[in-house]
Image (tube, grey):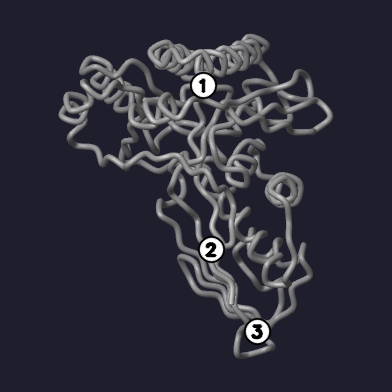
Amino acid sequence: MIVSSAPFRVSFAGGGSDIASYYRRQAGAVLSCAIAKYSFVIVHNYFNENKYHLKYTRTELGDRLEDIAHPLLREALRMHGVEPGIEVASVADIPSGTGLGSSSSFSVALINALYAHRSRFASKDQLAEEACKLEIDILKEPIGKQDQYAAAHGGLNFIEFNSNGGVNVQPVVLSSEKMAELESNILLFFTGSQRDTRSVLSTQVQAMETDEDKFRTVERMVQLAYEMRDILMSGDLGAFGEALHRGWMMKRSLTSQISNSAIDEFYNAARAAGAIGGKLAGAGGGGFLVLYCPKDRQERVRQALSQLKEIEFRFDWSGARIAFAQ
């Protein structure tokens, strides 16, 4: 039995520049971190050697890959040439459609589990590259590459996307004191709504491809990602919070689907209560509100957002890993 896990991620700046329609024209970059919330995949030999037994929000039992309904499972098994006689189950700390990159975390955890099941090792870059191939090239999902690399590598990273398709992952190194302060000053609140990431991202991609002003907005968001990396490394965390706010103002201007009146109300209430800056995690439209707020103001922010569910924020430093193998 193999138990594999990969973390979810929170993106701070540069989102959208990891999509091919942007980085093929101009190199993209994001600042993001992996968090201690995970997608888990369990792989085990199945008693019936002629069947695939798959368990997620539903259960599938079939004898051909073509009969498998779950697209990621079907194509990952096909990619790895997995024959019947295997059981795959998945669980996660947080549901999909909440802006934390759950689909890519699942893909990375699944691919790692399939390698481990055959007693083979795959590097973190290899896991990320295969997850990108699975989701973007094979399944044609309108997504970028940042989630797969964040899930595979873990930690706090500055990730660059080159016009030739290459990806560079650069860990952001802070003192232990500053890293602990940053971690303790980030709050995560679930807005209560889940959304179809494909629809939101497809609209953003279309906007970048057809509206030069929108493309230039993403270009400014990439520049801000570089600025925020440098701000973090200088140790000025208050400036980091202010830059997070500027980035959100840019992002929400891309399309009308990124925010709405309810989200704006939550965000404004948090800022009025003491949060310096924030944004919606992921593509937008719902999911998690990420806030930067000093410790002495956090209780006021919690009171202002008392109707929302808060999730404890902690960095993950392991990335994709095999948690159990026997």
Q: Which of the labelled discs sits on residue 323, or is there none? A: 2
The quadrant holding residue 31 is top right
Q: Is residue 312 left or right of residue 126?
A: left
Amino acid type shown at disc 1: Thr
Q: Height in image: 118 above or below 226?
A: below
Q: CA distance from mark 2 to mark 3?
A: 26 Å
Q: In the structure shown, which secondary structural element does the residue marked by tag 3 occupy?
A: loop
Residue at image point 74% right, 78% down: 83
The first of marks 1 and 2 along the sequence is 1
Q: Local crowd at mark 1 within 10 Å, few (<14), some, or many (≥20)?
A: some
The quadrant holding residue 324 is bottom right
Q: Local crowd at mark 3 within 10 Å, few (<14), some, or many (≥20)?
A: some
Q: CA distance from mark 1 to mark 2?
A: 40 Å
Q: Nearer the viewer, residue 240 or 270?
A: 240
Q: Nearer the viewer, residue 44 or 268?
A: 44
Q: Residue farthest to the right?
A: 164
Q: Is residue 227 left or right of residue 290?
A: right
Amino acid type shown at disc 2: Ala
What residue is shown with label 3?
Answer: 51
What residue is shown with label 1?
Answer: 255
Quadrant occupied by the N terminus: bottom right
Amino acid type shown at disc 3: Lys
Q: Height in image: 6 above or below 165?
A: below
Quadrant occupied by the C terminus: bottom right
Q: Local crowd at mark 2 within 10 Å, few (<14), some, or many (≥20)?
A: some
Contact, mark 2 vs mark 3 (Cβ under 8 Å) = no
Camera-near label (2 vs 3) is 2
